[in-house]
Image (tube, grey):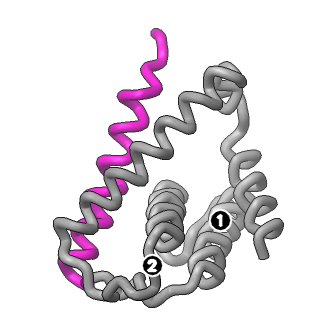
Amino acid sequence: MANNTSEEFDVVIKICKDLFIRKTKDYGTAWRILRLSSITDQIFIKAQRVRTLEEKKVSKVGEDIASEYIGIINYCIIAMIQMDMDESVSVDLPVEEVEVLYDATVRETKELMFAKNHDYGEAWRDMRISSLTDLILMKLLRVK
């Protein structure tokens, strides 16, 4: 069966976005207070937890690796939104505006993914998940 990267991407992003919007409705946009260094630290913590779960194969907290990757995706989107926002923008954003920002960031990311897929031929599909975790950690250490 052939892979349909676009559809698979959309399915994963729908899961991530649904959680993000639900949390925005419950907690507002408190994440707007975070500096980029704090956001990358949150991504680091989640990626480090994934690595620990991959190695130990047991979770005592009850959250699985998929949940952590959802968190990583959403924190990455938060970082991208924050980078594009002026500090004068209110910390409190309406849910509708957050949804527009989320969708625009995802669109930009999807376009980049397809440009890279063109050049690399979706080589990431043949990688181990643990290698992706390591790459995330390496890139985070570069920006620290």
Residue at (44% x, 67% y) in the render: 81
Q: Which residue is mark 1?
A: 47
Image location of residue 45, percent across then percent down: 64, 76
Left/right placement of residue 141 relative to residue 43 reads right
Label the magenta part by its dominant secondary structure: helix
Quadrant housing the C terminus? bottom right
Q: Report the residue that reaches farthest toward the top.
A: 1
Q: Please count the marks in the image.
A: 2
Image location of residue 117, percent across then percent down: 62, 26
Check disc 2 and report its element: helix, strand or loop. Answer: loop
Left/right placement of residue 102 relative to residue 27 reads right
Left/right placement of residue 43 relative to residue 101 reads right
Three-letter amino acid code at the position of disc 1: Ala
Residue at (17% x, 66% y) in the render: 96
Residue 117 higher or lower than 97, as above or below: above
What numbered label is drawn on residue 86? Answer: 2
Image location of residue 24, percent across then percent down: 26, 75
Q: Which residues are magenta?
A: 1-28
16 within the magenta span: yes
Which sits in the foreground, 51 or 41?
A: 41
Residue at (61% x, 65% y) in the render: 58
Quadrant of the image occupied by residue 126: top right
Nearer to us of marks 1 and 2 is: 2
Q: Earlier in the sequence, mark 1 or mark 2?
A: 1
Check disc 1 and report its element: helix, strand or loop. Answer: helix
Q: Does residue 69 appear in the picture of this structure?
A: yes
